[in-house]
Amino acid sequence: MKRTTLLTFAAALVMTACDSTTEPAAPGDPVFANAANEFFELPPTPLPDPCTGEVVIVSGKIHGVINTSVDPLGNTTFFLHVNSAAFKGEGATILTGEPTGTRYRGHIISNTRLVLDPLDGGFVTRDQTTIRLIRKGETDPTLEDDLVIRARLFLKDGTVQFLDVEAECAAVDVDA
């Protein structure tokens, strides 16, 4: 996705803020805060689906909001929230990539928090992402062919401290 673009944009905002004069902040109040609200096109991207045994080519519109703040100690915090505005997919065979005709609708929710420490240059990142792919047009609503992926990640100074990824095949009633 466009996380790199959003983080670059946020870093530019922080640098701009460092050049501006501000009133002294009360303890705990951010010295600088800003938000950006953007929409991005997700290019066609293959996602293996263990529930159906096919590859789903996902695409659509992704919405991202990034909030940036700098506290009185100079710690910079970026909070990135991403969700899907219009997310869809089409099934394809794993071996040939030929379309299967299966259509999906989907949803992404991702929250990432990055804190930079100005004293030692270290950083902490926490991310939680959920992706849902719901197969459309199925005749059996009890069939567990809808994919739910949940991922949690914790990084400290670039080293993975915790990673948990789970994929679940579920029966989701698309008419509900």
Image: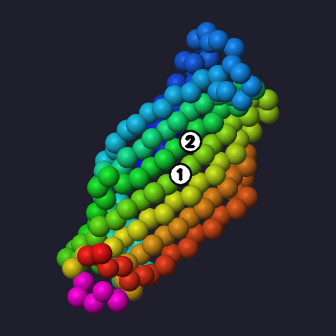
Tally of marks:
2
Q: Is residue 151 above or below residue 65?
A: below
Q: Is residue 151 above or below residue 80?
A: below
Q: Residues within 10 Å of mark 1 (few under 14, many from 20)?
A: some
> Which residue in the protein does label 1 denote?
111
Residue 91 at what x, y percent from top left?
28, 74
Picture disc at residue 79: 2
Q: Residue at x 35, y 89 (%)?
A: 143
> In the depicted view, which residue is nearer to us: 98 or 45?
45
Residue 118 at what x, y percent from top left?
74, 29
Residue 115 at what x, y percent from top left?
67, 39
Main secondary-structure element of the magenta-colored stretch: loop
> In the depicted view, which residue is nearer to us: 41 or 67?
67
Q: Is residue 155 magenta?
A: no
Q: Which quadrant of the structure image shows residue 134?
A: bottom left
Position of 176 compared to 80: left or right? left
The span picked out in magenta is: 138-143
Q: Earlier in the sequence, mark 1 or mark 2?
A: 2
The three-letter amino acid code for the residue at tag 1 is Asn
Q: Is residue 141 magenta?
A: yes
Residue 92 in view in this figure: no
Q: Is residue 123 above or below residue 109?
A: above
Q: Residue at x 36, y 70 (%)?
A: 133
Quarter of the figure that contains the C terminus:
bottom left
Q: Which quadrant of the structure image shows residue 96?
A: bottom left
Circle 1 — which element? strand
Q: Residue at x 62, y 17 (%)?
A: 18
Residue 157 at what x, y percent from top left?
73, 45
Q: Is residue 129 above or below residue 119?
A: below
> In the depicted view, which residue is nearer to us: 93 or 109?
109
Q: Are marks 1 and 2 in contact (CB under 8 Å)?
A: yes
